[in-house]
Image (cartoon, coloured by chain):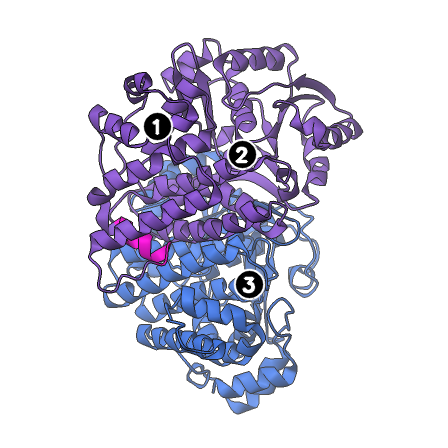
Chain colours: A purple, B blue
């Protein structure tokens, strides 16, 4: 465990088939005015909306609805949400949906009482939060981002073609989150596998950094093995509770700060993927899968011991009689096979990327320095070309 | 992930070589009266006492000292601590020491304002806490119990020959804990390896339960692999920061409720070990190591698939051409070799157990029902005999 760090994660999680009823324990802790934030309306079709509304009413709450959160929440929607929250002086934002809805709810929670433009302050300048924060609770219906137990919130600005995530402190973490694996059953397969790859990439972004021996990496390997196993089951049998529950739990622990402790962390795949998202509005997880193999094969020589370890400990590659480079390459090959097997998008053309966008996508990709290679703009373009 | 469960762990951890300075961030949150709880005085020899006192003084605190917490804190000492805490109306109990000191501090925190005998209420009757709780902070100087991030507190009653742990709710968890691996360097090797086995056994007590596929088990396997690796380094080179820091972090996550989520959990080794402790006052971790091999070999046939998985995933046993029983046995053999290699006590005679105690130890062992076999009294005696 390198350096000095602190860890605190106060979010209360309620997990399981009957977990929604625990809203009855949480709601009395907040005032009467609840902002109910959700997406495109799928929760009205699958009945979750009615269930949540019934609990809110039974707890005597006044509900201010804030529907229409899009998959990549925009800055315009953020301004709209801030107005609803501020005008009605809401006491709690209850986010019912996936990572986009949870991210958006957290962005509103810090932005509603921000006295300047929150995009400028919290995204372009990445300032610390010094205004009133509205508490957030989550009911998760889609799995992947880990947003239910962290302080991150990604917002997209289409005008400036920027998609930026700010990781806020633990006072912005959701106060509670309801995780019912059954709520994820109705999700289309495309969204499910995109979420699964988002989870995997959260783990690998943190794993592929550092040269030291670190317990966080051992935990990451365990999470990856569980995810790989359960994903194979879930794509064939989406209503397999065991698999879906393991995927849901893995998602939470993949990005709630635990596996980053004592590490530098990379995040370069997310930076490129988010830039692709700003240009194409493609599903987040697919923007990551589409560039990952080109990226990891590019940096593999710079972090060879870790890629070798990844191959052996995560993908069960037998190292006997092979060079380190061969072992590492075999690990990445097994990863690619698994990605194809579960149905991930493996090239950016399929996401709508055209040759004329490559320069802009590269420019919009923030360059990180915690991984095995600090990329140049040219290297990003070459990775994008290899991903076409 | 089986069943419905909730997870919340609000303890704030400060980790690293410079982590003690973060007391300056925590102390201002509490009133002026601090009860400083510690053990036999080793913190006066290694300088930690002076460092902590200087920070307490600089923060304008009045300190009420409560030294002399013994390795297995007694009910008499608990009564004494309650009196110090209540008479002085202390605002915070600062525990500086290992798991015994932290456990004792938590026991005092719930017992000081208990209107009846806390041993009867919180240990014999395992009642919920309904009185005022004094907040606890920890500065860890010995690693193993995970007490710094959980609600457990074990107290020993020599008169009735009972050593009982009560797992209190998250409002009894320490508010903060300082984890500086360097503070553990001066610990005698015997104590260090006892702590290492306590960690391993915390994980296996939770791992060896359930038939389902559960992400918690994958996390446990990661923690075990990290521990096995770092322990081998630490016994040869006790001042190896990397190894000691990984052991410290693994200890915290081995028993802060995470790897128990969605599981039944066993705890039978702890029940037998604690009963041995009540009879011999032996070091906790050694009471566990001394009975473990006999216990695990006894229950192995009842949980064969898990013991096979343990052998392959944790101990790298090659399963080719072997029966499941052979694979499982080879895993346990490797575990035993590792235990002998790091210098654990492997029989209870060495801890002072005599034949005439066996009946009483068996009777004092609470029988748990979450593992692969609910033991009879006769089976416990037979395990004890095999451990002599």
Q: Which mark is residue A351?
A: none
Q: Main SS type for the magenta part?
A: helix
Kindly identify which residue carries mark 1: A271
Residue B352 is situated, as x and y percent measured from the top left of the image, at 46, 84
Residue B98 is situated, as x and y percent measured from the top left of the image, at 42, 59
Residue drawn at the location 44% of the way across and 32% of the way down: A286
Kindly identify which residue carries mark 3: B154
Q: Is residue B295 magenta?
A: no
Q: Element at badge 3? A: strand
Q: Is residue A310 magenta?
A: yes
Q: Element at badge 2? A: helix
Residue drawn at the location 60% of the way across and 52% of the way down: A242
Which stretch appears magenta? A306-316
Residue A384 is situated, as x and y percent measured from the top left of the image, at 30, 28
* A74 relative to B224 in the view: left or right: right
Q: Nearer the viewer, mark 3 or mark 2?
A: 2
Circle 2 Cα neighbour tier, 10 Å, few/some/many (<14 / 14–19 / ≥20): some
Q: Nearer the viewer, mark 1 or mark 3?
A: 1
Q: Which mark is residue A191?
A: 2
């Amino acid at each position: 465990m390198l350096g000095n760090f602190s860890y605190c994660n106060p979010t209360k999680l309620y997990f399981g088939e009957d977990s929604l009823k625990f809203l009855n324990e949480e709601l009395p802790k907040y005032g009467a005015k609840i902002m109910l934030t959700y997406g495109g309306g799928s929760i009205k079709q699958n009945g979750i909306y009615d269930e949540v509304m019934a609990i809110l009413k039974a707890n005597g709450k006044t509900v201010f609805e804030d529907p229409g959160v899009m998959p990549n929440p925009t800055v315009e929607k953020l301004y709209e949400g801030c107005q609803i929250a501020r005008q009605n002086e809401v006491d709690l934002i209850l986010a019912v949906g996936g990572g986009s809805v949870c991210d958006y709810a957290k962005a509103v929670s810090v932005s509603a009482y921000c006295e300047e433009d929150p995009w400028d302050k919290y995204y372009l300048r990445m300032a610390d939060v010094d205004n009133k924060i509205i508490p957030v609770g989550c009911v998760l219906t889609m799995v992947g981002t880990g947003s239910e137990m962290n302080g991150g919130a990604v917002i997209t600005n289409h005008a400036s073609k920027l998609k930026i995530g700010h990781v806020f402190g633990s006072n912005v973490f959701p106060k509670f989150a309801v995780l019912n694996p059954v709520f994820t059953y109705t999700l289309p397969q495309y969204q499910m596998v995109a979420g699964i790859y988002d989870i995997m990439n959260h783990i690998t972004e943190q794993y592929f950094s550092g040269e030291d021996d670190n317990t966080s990496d051992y935990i990451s390997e365990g999470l990856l093995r569980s995810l790989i196993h359960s994903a194979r089951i879930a794509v064939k049998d989406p209503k397999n509770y065991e698999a879906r529950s393991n995927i849901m739990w893995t998602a939470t622990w993949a990005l709630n700060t635990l596996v980053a402790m004592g590490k530098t962390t990379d995040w370069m795949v997310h930076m490129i993927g988010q830039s692709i998202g700003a240009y194409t509005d493609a599903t987040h997880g697919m923007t990551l899968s589409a560039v990952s193999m080109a990226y990891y094969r590019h940096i593999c020589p710079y972090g060879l011991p870790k890629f070798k370890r990844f191959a052996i400990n995560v993908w069960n590659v037998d190292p006997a009689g092979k060079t380190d480079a061969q072992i590492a390459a075999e690990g990445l090959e097994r990863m690619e096979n698994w990605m194809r097997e579960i149905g991930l998008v493996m090239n950016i053309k399929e996401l709508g990327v055209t040759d004329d966008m490559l320069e802009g996508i590269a420019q919009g990709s923030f360059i990180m320095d915690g991984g095995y290679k600090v990329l140049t703009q040219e290297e990003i373009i070459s990775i994008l070309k290899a991903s076409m």
